[in-house]
Amino acid sequence: MARGFDSKGAAEYAHSREERRKAPRLDADEMALRKKREELELTRTNIRHQLETATNENRRAQLKAALAHIEGEIAKL
């Protein structure tokens, strides 16, 4: 039984390697753009979370301005 399990894992590994080879390769510009977008989305999530918990009106205004800026940057991409 252990052999069957091992061979199944090896087959899945080989299949995943083939899939990675078939996947289109991203050039440096595309990778940088993708990374920038992911960073902006994480920042947006963080700001939204802070906005939910903020009670000070000045802080909420700052967070709303930051959120608008981040969303504008994401829209540019």
Image: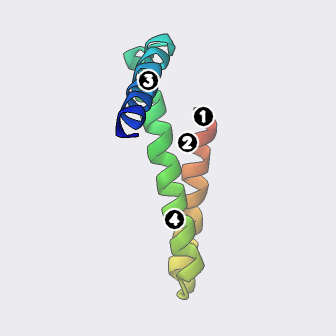
Nearer to us in this view, 12 or 66: 12
Amino acid tagged 4 = Ile
| Residue tagged 1 | 76
Q: Do the CB atoms of the residues marked 4 and 3 lie less than 8 Å apart? A: no
| Residue tagged 2 | 73
Res. 11 mark: 3
Q: Tell how many labels.
A: 4
Percent position (x, y) of residue 66? Answer: 52, 60
Amino acid tagged 2 = Glu
Q: Earlier in the sequence, mark 1 or mark 3?
A: 3
Q: Which residue appears at 53% of the width and 68% of the height?
A: 63
* Badge 4 element: helix
Res. 47 mark: 4
Percent position (x, y) of residue 42? Answer: 48, 53
- The 10 Å Cα crowd at callout 1, few under 14, some 14 to 19, many 20 or more, is few
Q: For the residues marked 2 and 1, what is the alpha-carbon distance in whole angstroms?
A: 5 Å
